[in-house]
Amino acid sequence: MAHGEFIMIGAYTGYVVQQLIPDYTISILVALPLAFAITFAAGVTMERLVIRWLYKRPLETLLSTFGISIALQQLAKNIFGTQARPLTSPDWLGGALVINDVVSISYIRIAIFVLALVFLAIFLFVMKKTRIGLEVRAVTQNPRMASSVGINPDRINMLTFGFGSGIAGIAGVAIGLFAQVTSELGQNYIVQSFMTVVVGGVGNIWGTLAGATLIGGLQKGIEWLNPSNTLAAQTYMILFIILFIQFRPRGIFALKGRAVEN
């Protein structure tokens, strides 16, 4: 429940960097790795202090991270105030790609889409071609067996949580380019994140990609049919998720196990 706040931290990191580096192109290039480092450290800290003690208690994990979420929002308000802070995009990201009289896509969103593809490729490389990726997959599938062959599940859980938090920080910089940076920025995306995981299937990157594509496409399609009421689109999407999990409770790409509890 506090993952959205890592998005917020990343966005504020981009804002602070732009105050120090007036060149918007250079500031974005500096802000992306810096946001990853800061949110990686924040994620590891939270995992060490809170999450590691609650891995087998999901309800308490939700409650504790919800409290952390509120605390981080208030901390951001104390530091930056309640006024929205701008994160300015470079001039070469201004304008939009006009496809026809109805469809146009801003260059900022195209750049974010390309950035997402780059990190998807990096993530797949790490998971499939490196030792740390092999250990992550082993701990995910069977932590006891992984521990018996010399893998430290505690360390892998910490690094995995930190890596996910770091990616959220990079997303915060990207989102800040077209959205006002406030302490509640991350809350706008946490619900969609949960819906993506539920629809796609927990533990499968291709499921996450499929779930995000399905949810994003349907929501924008509903908004196009009813552009004056975006709240209705979100309501319809929640109803769709409720119906979807009745038929596929484990998502589009469910992890296969040898036992029911897996």
Image (cartoon, rainbow, N blue to C red):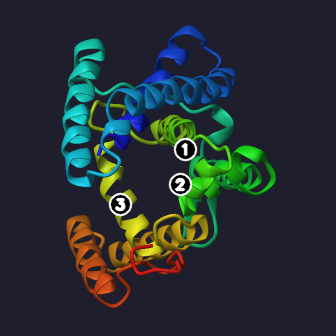
Q: Earlier in the sequence, mark 2 or mark 3?
A: 2
Q: Residue at x 73, y 49 (%)?
A: 126
**Is residue 147 depicted above or below 203 in this figure?**
above
Callout 1–callout 2 Cβ contact below 8 Å: yes
| Furthest-front residue in this view | 148
Helix, strand or loop at mark 1: helix
Disc 3 residue type (three-letter): Phe
Check disc 1: other Cα within 10 Å, few if <14, some if 14-19, many if 20+: many
**Is residue 40 depicted above or below 148 in this figure?**
above
- Residue 8 versus residue 260: which sits nearer the camera? 260
Residue at mark 1: 153
Q: Which quadrant is the C terminus positioned in?
A: bottom left
The percent coordinates of residue 80 (x first, y second) are 30, 16
- Residue 137 versus residue 92: which sits nearer the camera? 137
Residue 194: which disc?
Answer: 3
Q: CA distance from mark 3 to mark 1?
A: 24 Å
The percent coordinates of residue 196 (x first, y second) are 42, 66
Q: Earlier in the sequence, mark 3 or mark 1?
A: 1
Q: Residue at x 54, y 74 (%)?
A: 210
Q: CA distance from mark 2 to mark 3?
A: 24 Å
Helix, strand or loop at mark 2: helix
Foreground disc of the pair 2, 3: 2
Residue at mark 2: 143
Disc 2 residue type (three-letter): Pro
- Residue 88 versus residue 68: which sits nearer the camera? 68
Q: Earlier in the sequence, mark 1 or mark 2?
A: 2
12 on left or right of 25: left
